[in-house]
């Protein structure tokens, strides 16, 4: 699809750049700090305040960093996780095998877990740990079947809407909305007006949150937020 190369972000962790597209999988200001801020702090942590068994949907698995950070958070907080990742264009082993994320994770199983995330079979549920069940599906979100009323947390980490506008439409967000439980949250890095309008039109209540270094704001979209 796109030519790629590994680059190092400002916090020392890698990201992948789409050559000639001015697009990276994670922030060049810090890949790990961005993922922790957008998806763990402003996604998983919100739901973990009240739930210990959590179903997560990720749109755009990419490097697998969000899965790895979720696994670590779940271990540290005693959570039971079921995680479904949708990825239409998996990165090649010669790239993911060189990513340095496990180096930054203070856990002896980090490297093995990261390798398992990428080497596990598509469409087959795997156990990353005794309370962490993981499945990845190689498909476009537009074509995905999503069960209704299942997910507590959605990480919306697709390529930006200027590059891939079909991933950010009302039709896609309606599918995601229906797949989410009441009192659930979608977190994403993009705050573009077209995205906010599409989310609102599906029934989400949106809130801007402070962004990580290099980005002013990010977005939370809540389903039935009155009791959160």
Image (cartoon, helix red, strand yellow):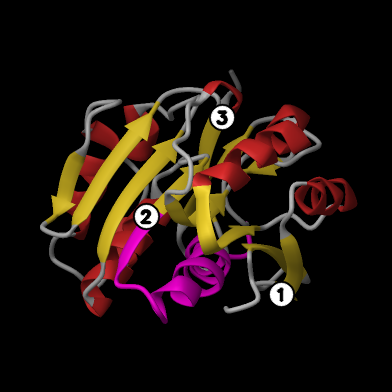
Q: Secondary structure at mark 2?
A: strand
Q: Point out the frontmost of discs 2 and 3.
A: 2
Asked whether residue 21 is in view, the answer is no
Mark before the other along the chain sequence, 3 or 1: 3
Q: Residue at x 58, y 65 (%)?
A: 38
How many residues crowd mark 1 within 10 Å: few (<14), some (14–19), many (20+)?
Answer: some
How many residues crowd mark 2 within 10 Å: few (<14), some (14–19), many (20+)?
Answer: many
Q: Quadrant of the C terminus?
A: bottom right
Q: Which corner quadrant of the image does residue 25 belong to?
A: top right
Q: Residue at x 61, y 22 (%)?
A: 2
Q: Point out the frontmost of discs 3 and 1.
A: 3
Q: Is residue 170 magenta?
A: no
Instruction: Name the residue that disc number 3 marks.
Output: 141
Q: Height in image: 1 above or below 40? A: above
Residue 60: image x %, image y %? 52, 39
Give the residues drawn in magenta, as a range: 28-55
Front position in the image: 220 or 2: 220
Q: Secondary structure at mark 3?
A: helix
| Residue 209: assigned label | 1
């Amino acid at each position: 699809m796109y030519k790629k190369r590994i680059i190092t972000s400002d916090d020392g962790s890698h990201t992948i750049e789409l050559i000639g597209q001015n697009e990276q999988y994670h922030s060049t200001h810090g890949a790990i700090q961005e993922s922790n801020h957008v998806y763990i702090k402003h996604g998983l942590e919100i739901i973990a305040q009240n739930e210990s068994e959590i179903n997560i949907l990720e749109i755009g698995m990419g490097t697998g960093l969000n899965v790895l950070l979720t696994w670590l958070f779940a271990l540290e907080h005693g959570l039971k996780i079921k995680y479904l990742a949708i990825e239409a264009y998996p990165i090649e082993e010669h790239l993911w095998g060189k990513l340095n994320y496990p180096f930054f994770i203070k856990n002896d199983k980090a490297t093995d877990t990261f390798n398992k995330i990428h080497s596990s079979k598509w469409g087959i549920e795997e156990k990353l740990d005794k309370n962490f069940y993981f499945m990845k599906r190689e498909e476009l979100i537009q074509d995905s079947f999503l069960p209704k009323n299942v997910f507590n947390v959605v990480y919306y980490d697709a390529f930006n809407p200027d590059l891939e506008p079909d991933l950010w439409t009302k039709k896609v967000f309606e599918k995601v909305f229906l797949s989410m439980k009441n009192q659930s949250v979608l977190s994403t890095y993009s705050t573009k007006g077209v995205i906010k309008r599409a989310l609102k039109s599906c029934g989400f209540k949106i809130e801007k949150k402070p962004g990580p270094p290099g980005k002013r704001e990010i977005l939370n979209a809540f389903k039935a937020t009155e009791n959160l």
